[in-house]
Amino acid sequence: MDRERQQELREKDRQYVWHPFTQMKDYAAQDHVLIEKADGIMLYDADGKSYYDTISSWWCNVHGHGNPRIKEAIRRQLEQFDHIMFSGLTHQPGIELAEQLVQVTPDGLTKVFYSDNGSTAVEVAIKMSFQYWQQIGQQSKTNFVFMENSYHGDTIGAVSVGGVDLYHAMFKPLLFNAIRVPSPDVRQLGNERTPEREAALVADALDAVRTLFRERAHELAGIIVEPMIQAAGGMVIYPAAYLRGLRELCAQFNVHLIADEVATGFGRTGRMFACEHAGISPDILCLSKGLTAGMMPLAATLCREEIYAAFYDDYATQKTFFHGHSFTGNPVACAVALESLRLFRDEAVLEQSQAAANTLTEQMNTFTSLPHVADVRQLGMIAALDLYRDPETRTPFASDLRIGTRMYHAGLAEGLILRPLGDTIYYWLPLCTTPSQIEDIVERTQRVLRQVTAPLS
Ligand code: PMP
């Protein structure tokens, strides 16, 4: 695209568009990357410059951009029919996808409720759990529990169970009351991290839940959790034992375990679903992002039969789940999700990505010797590290240095889309990333890191 047209578009961008999670005054002062093409893990701007999409376009993209089989599935579905309402009408892609989801997700989840983004998958879970307890005569079970540092989306219900003050505190007057419990944030252990200390931290975090459940389970509908990794809260990977403990407590005290796998679902952690690391099944499961391999907006909330059964009655009993969205069960998105699941099977995607994940482990180890780096961590194709002024004492850089923002800009010059969370640098790689691409990404990131931190040492 010629430069003049690019500038014209950028001007219109400044004039008309309000971007998410963006301070628009900062934004307006810069020329932003105008993407013109995407292929595999690469994005290309209007000048033809390439960038590694190291965060899978906000953790969505699974098989790389522009996968030909997915593009063909979109075309095939559009030739048949486009969007139709999913209430009173039904369709093959929506039906088949529900059947497949019940098969591939952890045991015991039998019904699929569609929506169209991660936040609404969470809203559906909250309302479903709430209404369930109302309908089985346990009207006092109206409260929800969430973890410190959790993130479940930006709609009001999802924010009510959000634990990242930067995003959530401002909206407090608008939110329903929910109860915060500590998260087993293993980063607290600093350099003293050993399996015994981790186990003690997990035990403490579970004790807090146990105490709460003992005292107030009669008021509690559910506890919502991001399995294995608190993503937006800083890419905190925590031990599977915590999830196993939560599963037991929820069963013992009759509280729903709601697993938000919007981000972790569909292979990103090395298993199809992160709950599998702990060998547990939730009562309600939220999915989106990778559900369509990140190619179309779609979400699903799955639940156990017992929950569904509490809504299944004569109309006159008013037990209908009065919830739905215009784009519920969009057939094109369902067709894409089905094709993505076929790809997982036909191309043994999970098995293939294991080799790449091993390379990622080796490569992440090379960060440990760099200055300012601490807490290098990884789960499958997700990896992160934290930058500190002094990593020994975990003394942070002054926040006005905006290290993450500097890394982002320097990353662009090196052909990397990095999108740090504060001073946490992370990758959330598509499963198609090859070992040699990972080596290249890490080499570039280390150049960026040296460039950004050297003047501050
Ligand atoms: N849950 C989790 C765990 C997430 O990471 C996100 C988004 N990053 C959401 C819910 C919300 O999804 P969406 O942005 O599609 O509304």
Image (cartoon, rainbow, N blue to C red):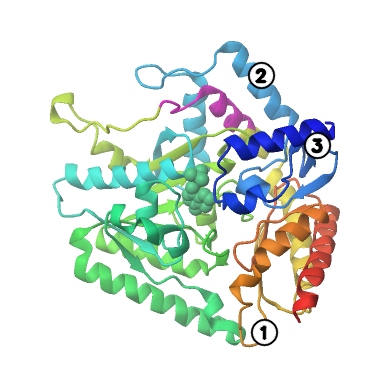
Instruction: Estimate the x, y position of residue 31 in percent, counting from the top left.
Output: 73, 46
Select label 1 or label 3 by which is in front: 3
The CA distance from mark 2 to mark 3 is: 26 Å
Q: Amino acid at mark 1?
A: Asp
The mark nearer the N terminus, 1 or 3, is 3
**Residue under circle 2?**
75
* Mark sitting earlier along the chain (2/1): 2
Decide: few, some or many residues near mark 3? Use Cα within 10 Å; few <14, some 14-19, many ≥20. some
For the residues bearing labels 2 and 1, Cβ distance under 8 angstroms: no
- Residue 375, located in which quarter of the rendered image? bottom right
Q: Distance of mark 1 from mark 3, alpha carbons?
A: 40 Å
- Region rendered in magenta: 326-339
Q: Residue at x 51, y 66 (%)?
A: 240
Q: Is residue 274 visible to us here?
A: yes
Q: Residues within 10 Å of mark 2 (few under 14, many from 20)?
A: some
Residue sitting nearer the eye, 36 or 22: 22
Q: Secondary structure at mark 1?
A: loop
Residue at 61% in and 44% down: 60
Which quarter shows the C terminus? Answer: bottom right
Quadrant location of residue 296?
Answer: top right
**Image quarter of the N terminus:** top right
Q: Nearer the viewer, residue 159 or 123?
A: 159
**Are circles 2 and 3 on residues that touch, CB within 8 Å?**
no
Do we see residue 271 in this rendering?
no
Pointer 3: what residue?
46
List the residue tagged with mark 1. Answer: 390
- Classified by dominant secondary structure, the portion drawn in magenta counts as helix
> Which element type, helix, strand or loop, lies under badge 2?
helix
The x and y percentages for residue 353 are: 73, 51
